Amino acid sequence: MLTAASKGIIGCETCGLAQRAFPTTQRLVCSRCGADMHFRKPNSISQTWALVISAYVLIIPANLMPVMATGSLFGTEKDTIFGGVVFLWTSNSQILAIILFCASIVIPFAKLISLTFLLISVQIRSSWKPKVRAKLYRMVEAIGRWSMIDVYVATMLTALVQFGNLMNIRAGAGAIAFATVVVLTIFAAKSFDPRLIWDAADHSKNNDNIAEELHV
Amino acid sequence: MSDTSQGPEFPNLPSVITKAQRRWAPQLIWIIPIVAILVGLGLMYKAVIDHGPTITVAFKSGDGLIAGKTNVKYKEVDIGLVKTVILSEDHQQVLATIELNKDASAFSNKDTRFWIVRPRITASGVTGLSTLLDGPFIAADIGKSTEKIDSFVALEVPPILTGGTPGREFVLRAPTLGSHNVGTPVYFRRLNVGQVVAYDLDKDGKNVSIRVFIDAPYDQYVTNNTRFWNASGIDVSLNSDGIQVHTESLVAVVAGGIAFEAPLTSQDISDRLVNHPNQTNVSDTKQAATPLTERAQPDAIFSLFPTRIVAMKQPDARIERFVINFKQSVRGLSIGAPVEFRGVNMGEVVSIETAMDPRTYEIVQPVEIFLYPDRLHVRSLKSGKLLPPPENELSRLKTLISKGFRAQLRTGSYLTGQQYIGLDFFPGSPKYTLDVSKYPLEIPAIPGAFEDIEKTMADVIKNTDKLVKKLDDQILPEFDKTLKNINAITAGDSPLQTDMRDSLRELTKAASSIKTLTDMLDQQPQSLIFGKPPEESK
């Protein structure tokens, strides 16, 4: 597949200006806005891997530890994300339960799995349906931030519901882990360079010289 | 994107500015996963470290137990959480799996107690009100055992005392539980110093063991010779002493209670007497110097007496058994009736039987008694000093019996008819030789005073009876004959009657002539001398 890089053209990631460039060891700077430019994001795969692995590690406590500790006259209750889903479902709020389940459990996991899939497919230079993979990547990038609603809710409640002994809500350790997971996946999606998808596809067409160089 | 193929044909594309490459530490990003892994491992380690033992507690009812929510508390601090609540296999119990905190692992000690705290109203007050709002929780009381187990049976009722309360526990053994219950107060000189914490039927079913807890400063007064007695309710007893009513304080009357006290030993009494002249000085030093009676060990066993009087009886170290063969009715004598010597209680009746000699067909009532020989102090009559008891009890008894020592059935109360056995000297009583080979030894009986009266009365009645019979047999027929004769005499046609009539007529005549005489004399008294005057003068 034809890529700009293979033709010595580079697009500025900040202002979008396409410029002519040559493979070089020197730093490339956009002639218009002065931003750093790369043919491909440097260390994209390893950076993404690092973030994805971190997210994988932290998603475990995020789901096992309580997100919110609700203290009231009736004692303290600690809820995990899944506990909240179960609570909503059993208290006849199935729709809310599904939303919470999707936003807080399905999406983070789906994101991580998708990123892992993209990373592996790029690393083994798979040429399998690059358009589908590109679409998947765009989806991952788009929905990533929505997982934060859970964190926002916890944060808002913690800030608002403070009535001393009567009722108070504290964010649990799970909320921090969960927020970290969401942030990490957002950064992982950012650090992943979707152009690599096309490189791999290109490489399958024996255009590996440039690709090889540009990967570094 | 079709025109990207013309990419190279864009000559007017600006060129990128190249600058010297900045040296980046390329793999800095990997710090993030390393930190994440470290944090994750830390959390995992903490979870593993914090993970205390998991125990199972069996409850009778799972009321209010919620998996994942019900806490286990000790001194109002969370020490664990109920993880699951399931039914036991036989569906008789509710098994709650409890995950204890790491620092609460001591709560898996074998004798740790668990119970559900619910609002509870008892005589001692209202407890567990907070659980009305936030639901019941499981309370624990840490055990002291070093043995660890993982399955417990919860208490039905919260224990009165939880670990750490200073004081000591003692065991009281009583034939019945009486009106005691868990929480029944224990009094020492009318002070509430403890309470009943548990009771249990002995395995043989013959006694009840009541565990009492005496709070710390007072437990020192529980000594080895302390007596415990029932202070509950009103004790009305009817015996040969008449009707007796004993009560403790009003609270104890209503709520029941147990009281204890150490009886005064004879040494105490003599100490008191000795100390009397300058009491303050000596008694202080004495108290410090003489721990007369040692503090009882925890879990020491005492017997629970029914009343204070019974409890405070002097302990009788030596008991001797005797039999008294009564040849009379022992009605009114009961087991436990006192044996008194001149009004001093020396023992008690332990059995009353009836026995027959198969050869002579003589029937006696053997009454077995316990005598406490130590109650008979040996004292020099001259100096008043107590002397050690004689070594040969048997010869003493022989001598006593030869001096007329006898047992007698006596009436303690004419109102109730209760009888007791009186011992005394009857110098004139028939001779008796003690048969030493028999066991128990026999104390000869002599008829009681009341029995004597009875006998005399019977004799009198017997004599009267004889007299009546004699009257019946001999005198009555004679009397009958006499009456018949009288009848014959008084019949209408009897010669006596006729004679009587004649006689009466003659008598009337005589009377009238006397009347004439007297009349004449009245009118003419001279006639007595001059004779009858002539007719014409009349």
Image (cartoon, coloured by chain):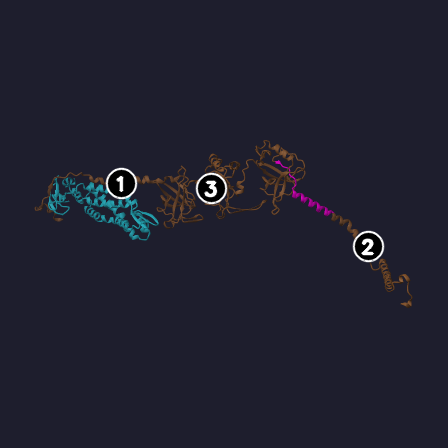
Chain colours: A cyan, B brown
**CB atoms of marks 2 and 1 within 8 Å:** no
- Provide residue A200's location: percent of width, then percent of height: 17, 42
Residue at which label 3 appears: B211
**In this picture, residue A166 sits left or right of residue A204:** right
**In this picture, residue A115 sits left or right of residue B340:** left
**In this picture, residue B336 sits left or right of residue B72:** right
Mark 1 crowd level (few <14, some 14–19, many ≥20, 10 Å Cα): some
Name the N-terminal-most of marks 1 and 3. Answer: 1
Residue at which label 1 appears: B39
The answer to whether B368 is drawn above or below residue A87 in the figure is: above
| Mark 1 belongs to chain | B
- Provide residue B465's location: percent of width, then percent of height: 72, 47
**CB atoms of marks 3 and 2 within 8 Å:** no
Q: CA distance from mark 3 to mark 2?
A: 96 Å
Q: CA distance from mark 2 to mark 1?
A: 146 Å
Residue B321 in the magenta stretch? The answer is no
Give the extent of the magenta segment: B441-466
Between B368 and B90, which is closer to the camera in this rendering?
B368
Q: CA distance from mark 1 to mark 3?
A: 53 Å
- Provide residue B344's location: percent of width, then percent of height: 59, 40
**CB atoms of marks 1 and 3 within 8 Å:** no
Between B460 and A19, which is closer to the camera in this rendering?
B460
Query: Which picture quadrant has residue B516?
Result: bottom right
- Report the mark closest to the observer, 2 or 1: 2
Amino acid carrying mark 2 in the image: Asn
Name the N-terminal-most of marks 2 and 1. Answer: 1
Q: Main secondary structure of the magenta part?
A: helix
Amino acid carrying mark 3 in the image: Arg
Report helix, strand or loop for mark 1.
helix
Q: Is residue B202 visible?
A: no
Amino acid carrying mark 1 in the image: Val
Residue at which label 2 appears: B485
